[in-house]
Amino acid sequence: MDIPFLPPNDLTFPDPRPALACSKRNGWVCVSADLRPERILAAYRCGIFPWHSDRDYFYWFATAPRAVLYPAELHLSRSLAKTLRNRAYRVSVNQDFAAVMGACAAAPRVGQDGTWIAPAFQRAYGALHQQGFAHSFECWLPDGKGGEILAGGLYGVQIGAVFFGESMFAKLPDASKIAFACAVPYLADCGVRLIDCQQDTGHLARFGSRTLPFDDFQQALAEYTVLPCTIGRGTVRENP
């Protein structure tokens, strides 16, 4: 396979369609020798994301059809809605980005040996967080001693009115679901029009995700990433 290698001083990405059309490439678009924050942002604007690293090289992918969630279409199961009403929890935004990303890296993944969230990824997305592009949502549950523990959460990248979801974790049952269920309406209130879920999974489908042809997804990115949107810091929702 002839995989394009990105020049170090050029943030232009190749058209991902050949990678999507080739079964042998499985969406593998290109390779780079760096994971600079500005390269990550340029990739997301094209519908591309970094997903693997090996010996200081970073592999960039695209998926099609693309799984997305329109915030207005969020669906909560009856059991999760009951949990949100009856369980004590607090969901916050941007209160501990490093801990959330570290927990996502440490979470075991079915069918995966290790994690793609290597230290280089944590540094790059940490820099994006400092720049105001990467955001975390934390689910805090009672620790039984009058305090609370970080029980679950998720993180992603926001460009304009698009939130690109990256990963989530749960140390206690329902913690990541609570975080996601509270994050989506909060993002909508901030101005987010589209959430990129990347992978089409049954878990996300139960929340109301759907798939878009890649051309439609790129058109949505061109329209929404230029819109204004500001995500803050603090408590998103609390249920005593």
Image: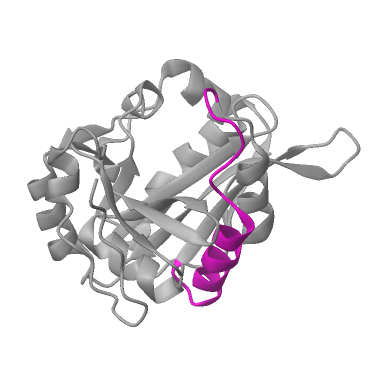
The image quarter containing residue 106 is top right
Q: Is residue 15 magenta?
A: no
Q: How many marks?
A: 0
Quadrant showing the N terminus: top left
Compared with residue 107, is residue 96 higher up or lower down, i.e. above or below?
below
Q: Position of residue 198 (x, y in %)?
A: 32, 42
Work out whether residue 172 or residue 167 is closer to the camera in this orientation and state it: 167
In the rendered structure, the answer to whether residue 117 lies left or right of residue 203 reads right
Residue shown at 37%/30% (left/top)? 204
Compared with residue 49, is residue 149 higher up or lower down, i.e. above or below?
above
Residue span colored magenta: 110-133
Q: Position of residue 22 (x, y in %)?
A: 16, 38
Q: Position of residue 61 (x, y in %)?
A: 31, 49
Quadrant showing the C terminus: top right
Furthest-bottom residue in this view: 9
Work out whether residue 31 or residue 74 is closer to the camera in this orientation and state it: 31
Residue shown at 32%/35% (left/top)? 74
Compared with residue 78, is residue 211 higher up or lower down, i.e. above or below?
below
Work out whether residue 133 or residue 140 is closer to the camera in this orientation and state it: 133
